[in-house]
Image (tube, rainbow, N blue to C red):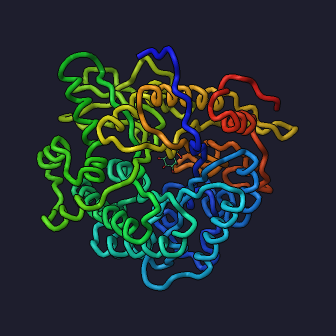
Amino acid sequence: MKHQQLTPFPDGFLWGASTSAYQVEGAWNEGGKGPSVIDKATFSDKITDFTVTSDHYHRFKQDVALFAELGLRTYRFSIAWSRLFPQGSGELNAEGVAFYQQLIDELRHHNIEPLVTLYHFDLPWALQEKGGWSDPATIDAFVHFARTAFELYGDRVNYWLTINEQNMMILKGDVIGTLPPGTPDPQKTLYQQNHHMMLAQAKAMIACHEMLPQAKIGPAPNISCVYPASSRPEDVLAANNFTSIRNWLYLDLACFGHYNAVAWSFMREKGYLPTITEQEMAILRQGKPDFIAFNYYASATVGADLPYSNGEQEAGKLLDQQLAGIDTIVYVGVENRWLKKNQFNWYIDPVGFRITARQIYERYRLTLIVTENGLGAFDELTADNKVHDDYRIAYLHDHIEQLQLAISDGVELFGYCPWSAIDLVSTHQGIRKRYGFIYVNRDEHDLKDLARFKKKSFSWYQRVIQTNGQNLSEGVDY
Ligand code: BGP
């Protein structure tokens, strides 16, 4: 649809930016924090230092002041579960409690609305050792953790996110570290874990509504529209399969409280069906989100079978959460010749962003917020401490433009939080893959002085926020 007139971003729109605890805080073993699966993961060992990351734990006041200067109306961050509960459950760590109290107070002091993710990939190691999400006791531990966070911070936090990218943890369990290496029957195990996470999420949403009637809570999956490789009906069917398995399985359970039919039949065919009870399904039906948060980086394209030239099969590329991958009886990830790629081989597809937002809104009719979207790139700090990241400005410009088109299409959207507020360590590609508006002066292993420098995109986004998204194209002084 070509609009003659665009609908403006609503008043009070939450312009924001995101981070997650294990990627930004550092202080991995300070302040009484227990280890998480990330601290024990082997994937990052050689690539980068994950123990200090951006040192936000020690520099949060300086960082929040910069976020305020940027003009953020909201800041999305996650609570490190093992900072509150070093053992995952049991004893509460007072220093961890105090850290998030101070962070939230600092945000409030600057009129920045905290948007809190309860769990962003960093399951406490003590729980992982007992079976992690395969053990139903982890559901209780999560619910206790969530209730504690509601109790501690509920008077100052109005927006909560349950679990970050649960769908990626299941689809890419080996990449993100959800599953200990060597787990027998990994796929079946992951779908059972998925069921447990869904229950944990539903119970947390129920608890939130009971304890904090004024607060709002929702899931935060990674959702991408899926294109068929061609107009061949079999390819369209494959795209449909992948949409159900990648996207709707998770959101149908969260919003409707039932298993998506196509995803269910996929799990049955493959022998991945989880064990479920009627009582559990009743809990899933009862727990309802107030909104849907979603992360979007790129679209996916799939075909029915292998005759297509398949860039995704090249060695090493499968180790990535944004690639569809291959399941020969269901879908095959293929190249999309219409789209450009970034330096890390992720597609850049702003129109896909609009399509994705429309699809989610049309299906669930819940208001949306974008909790991640951004460009990972090799930024260069010049001799005079500048970063001329015009490529990031271009990416964000094109995506925000499409977001306004989605709003003009009728999609209800209340916020946009690009990834990331400040440079942080990438999930598996180190600090060299930078996303932030603020440069952090460190290399992979040489931590330098960790000084902060505003990038050109900082000034640009500042203007976007000031003009409520009406001034995307104007250049900025930098
Ligand atoms: C999402 C995660 C984030 C972040 C982002 C960028 O999947 O929720 O934690 O890492 O992707 O990914 P990467 O760091 O791999 O570039």
Q: Quadrant of the N terminus?
A: top left
As displayed, is residue 14 above or below residue 357? below
Hey, which residue is sitting farthest bottom in the picture? 91
Q: Residue at x 63, y 26 (%)?
A: 394
Percent across and percent down for residue 286 are 25, 61
Is residue 207 in view? Answer: yes
Q: Left or right of 191: which side holds 444? A: right
At horizontal 42% and vertical 50% (from top left) the residue drawn is 220
Name the residue nearer the viewer: 350 or 32. 350
Residue at (63% x, 62% y) in the render: 25
Against 13, is 49 above or below? Answer: below
Left or right of 66? Residue 116 is: left
Q: Position of residue 398 (x, y in %)?
A: 56, 25
Point out residue 301 in the picture as x, y percentages from the top left corner: 34, 27
Task: Name the quadrant of the C terminus.
Answer: top right
**Residue 96 drawn above or below residue 385:** below
Q: Is residue 78 left or right of residue 190?
A: right
Looking at the image, which residue is at 55% across and 46% down? 429
Q: Residue furthest right?
A: 384
Location of residue 400 by image quarter? top right
Q: Measuring from the top left, give residue 34's x and y in whole percent.
A: 53, 76
Tell me how many marks there are.
Answer: 0
Residue 175, can we see it?
no
